[in-house]
Image: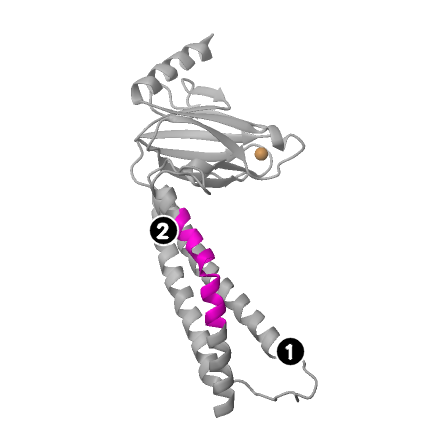
Amino acid sequence: MRSDLRLVACSLRQAARFFIAIIGSVALPTTVLALDASGVRVWLPEGVTTVAPVIDRLFYVVLVITGVVFLLVQATLLVFLIRYRRRPGRAAHYTHGNNAVEVVWTVIPALILAWLAFYSQRVWSQVRGTPPPADLHIEITAEQFVWNIRYAGPDGELNTPDDITTINQLHLPVHQIVLVHLKSKDVIHSFFVPQFRMKLDAVPGMTGRLWFSATKTGHYEIACAELCGLGHYRMRGYLTIESPEEFQAWLTKTQAENRT
Ligand SMILES: [Cu+2]
């Protein structure tokens, strides 16, 4: 038992030394996070909704934890492979293992996973839980291979004769809470705007619900993130985030075009 412990301690020391040599790589996600926070894009595209920072933080926390565990496991494996390789004249050593070490490497990951479960649940309920009262309701119906977009007309109600409709052109006002009612006419599609950190399947027969508030004006692309047929690659929408005044002007113009 004591010799087992000494063996484990010695190998762990060696693994630690090896790990220190490659610890530079652990600093990578931290650097990426710091650069992202300072506005330099190295990995994820810019996040332009109110919930994007919380989603990104969760992503990087998971990345750092799994990155450290990955490096530790690989370093230990390498050290053991070299240190205990077959050598002439050295007999194999039989060991049943070490209960204390096994308890430690079971309890620590279990605690980390439980903490991550609670942490991600908090983020999930913020992003996909009950939406806050919306400033604007729109309906998006996916179809092979376009996005049909519907705004309420002057009566403020969706699915009435005065609705304003567009194809693939989604304009939204900045800093307003938008609630999307997402539908599909035919097969499963998926509404995806990477900069919004938003992705939701459009399932025939169901109405999905997605809310967000954009924090920056600009032009973005809506991708279909579900292989939905031969034309899937060209199922692309254009999203413009603009000031409320510009949005109103665009809506009025589109309404006039709908009538002609
Ligand atoms: Cu599609």
Q: CA distance from mark 1 to mark 2?
A: 46 Å
Q: Coloured how? A: one colour
Q: Position of residue 27 (x, y in %)?
A: 42, 55
69 over 89 or under it: above or below: above
Under circle 1, the secondary element is loop
The one of 12 and 224 positioned closer to us in this rendering: 12
Residue 158 position by quadrant: top left
Q: Position of residue 160 (x, y in %)?
A: 41, 22
Examine the structure image and report whether residue 180 is included in the region drawn in magenta. no
- In the picture, the disc for residue 184 is none
Which residue has dot 2 on it? Answer: 123
Under circle 2, the secondary element is helix
Q: Are marks 1 and 2 in contact (CB under 8 Å)?
A: no
- The secondary structure that most of the magenta stretch takes on is helix
State whether residue 1 appears in this view.
Answer: no
- Three-letter code, disc 1: Arg
Mark 2 CB near ligand 1 (8 Å cut): no
Name the outermost residue toward the top. 260
Which residue has dot 1 on it? Answer: 85
> Magenta segment range?
15-32
- Quadrant for ligand 1 reads top right
Q: Position of residue 102 (x, y in %)?
A: 48, 80
Q: How many marks?
A: 2
- Three-letter code, disc 2: Val
Residue, x 39% and y 26% (percent of image)?
Answer: 218
Residue, x 38% and y 55% (percent of image)?
Answer: 121
Residue, x 33% and y 20% (percent of image)?
Answer: 155
The one of 33 and 221 positioned closer to us in this rendering: 33
Examine the structure image and report whether residue 19 is included in the region drawn in magenta. yes
24 over 36 or under it: above or below: below
